[in-house]
Image: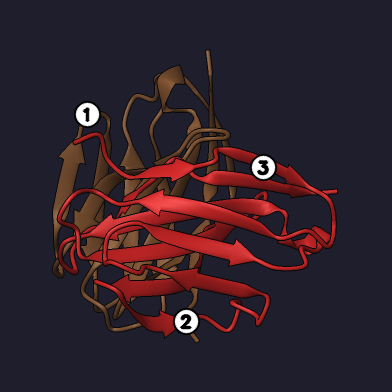
């Protein structure tokens, strides 16, 4: 097992376009998290899945954001009508319990 | 609202010196995390502190937790250049981690 993977690693898009990111958690981890990190700041929680159920969403997750984990394995995070303020690193993490979250390499989004 | 405060936010130190990074957090959680992040990279887990009085050491780094004071410390002993990175502490409430702003550490030769 090679850990949490994310795709793409980098994405440049024009304002107003839609983007989708994918996260593959560590095998058999039933919990999956999305965070966003802007330059010079710590990561901020966006949402959390246990298996396929989305159990918690941050107020940061506006209507333009949607996340899914349809079969309880990989997850996607879609941003519609991107804005320049969406430029950030989007981090995915997974865990098998409450103790420790393992982070993926992140997807860096630049909105021009 | 959860709040995690780290200080200092920027730390420049010479190789061979010792220093401590402080992390104050807001909940009564008995779990506290330390992560390392290199520029443009993801987060690497350093320590998970699970109870009051917990102390963990790995190489030149030692972390401790005082839940009564809501304070965790990350102590650096005899710093080396390879320790240059940003260090985050994080507390947890339920599922989510709440991170501090990070301490950007630069170790100079």
Left/right of residue B103 with respect to residue A3 in the rendered view: right
Instruction: Choose between B71 and A51: the one closer to the eye.
Output: A51
- The chain letter for the residue carrying disc 2 is A
| Coordinates of residue B69 in the picture (x, y in percent) | 31, 75
Residue drawn at (32%, 45%), measured in percent from left and top?
A4
Q: Is residue B23 above or below residue A14?
A: below
- Chain brown in the figure, letter: B
| Coordinates of residue A54 in the picture (x, y in percent) | 37, 79
How many angstroms separate mark 3 from mark 2 (CA)? 24 Å
Residue drawn at (83%, 62%), measured in percent from left and top?
A16
- Picture colour for chain A: red
Q: Are the residues under badges 3 and 2 in a single subunit?
A: yes
How many angstroms separate mark 1 from mark 3 (CA)? 37 Å
Q: Residue furthest top?
A: B109
Callout 2–callout 1 Cβ contact below 8 Å? no
Element at badge 3? strand
Q: Which residue is mark 3?
A: A11
Q: Which residue is mark 1?
A: B59
Q: Is residue B20 above or below residue A61?
A: above
- The chain letter for the residue carrying disc 3 is A
Q: Are the residues under badges 1 and 3 in a single subunit?
A: no
Residue drawn at (50%, 36%), measured in percent from left and top?
B41
In the rendered image, the quadrant that contains the N terminus of chain A is top left
- The chain letter for the residue carrying disc 1 is B
Residue drawn at (78%, 58%), measured in percent from left and top?
A17
Element at badge 2? strand
Q: Which residue is mark 2?
A: A57
């Amino acid at each position: 097992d090679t850990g949490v993977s994310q795709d793409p690693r980098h994405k440049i898009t024009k304002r107003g376009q839609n983007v989708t990111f994918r996260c593959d958690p560590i095998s058999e981890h039933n919990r999956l998290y999305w965070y966003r990190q802007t330059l010079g700041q710590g990561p901020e929680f966006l949402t959390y899945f246990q298996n396929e159920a989305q159990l918690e969403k941050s107020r940061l997750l506006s209507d333009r954001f949607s996340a899914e984990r349809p079969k309880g394995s990989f997850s996607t995070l879609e941003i519609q009508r991107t804005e320049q303020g969406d430029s950030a690193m989007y981090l995915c993490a997974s865990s098998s319990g409450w103790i420790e979250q393992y982070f993926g390499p992140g997807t860096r989004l630049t909105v021009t | 609202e959860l709040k995690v405060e780290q200080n200092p936010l920027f730390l420049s130190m010479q190789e061979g010196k010792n220093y401590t990074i402080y992390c104050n957090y807001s909940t009564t959680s008995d779990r506290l995390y330390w992560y390392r992040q290199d520029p443009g990279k993801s987060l690497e887990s350093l320590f998970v502190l699970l109870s009051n009085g917990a102390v963990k050491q790995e190489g030149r780094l030692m972390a401790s937790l005082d839940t009564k004071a809501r304070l965790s410390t990350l102590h650096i002993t005899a710093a080396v250049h390879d320790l240059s990175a940003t260090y985050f502490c994080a507390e947890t409430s339920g599922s989510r981690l709440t991170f501090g702003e990070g301490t950007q550490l630069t170790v100079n030769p």
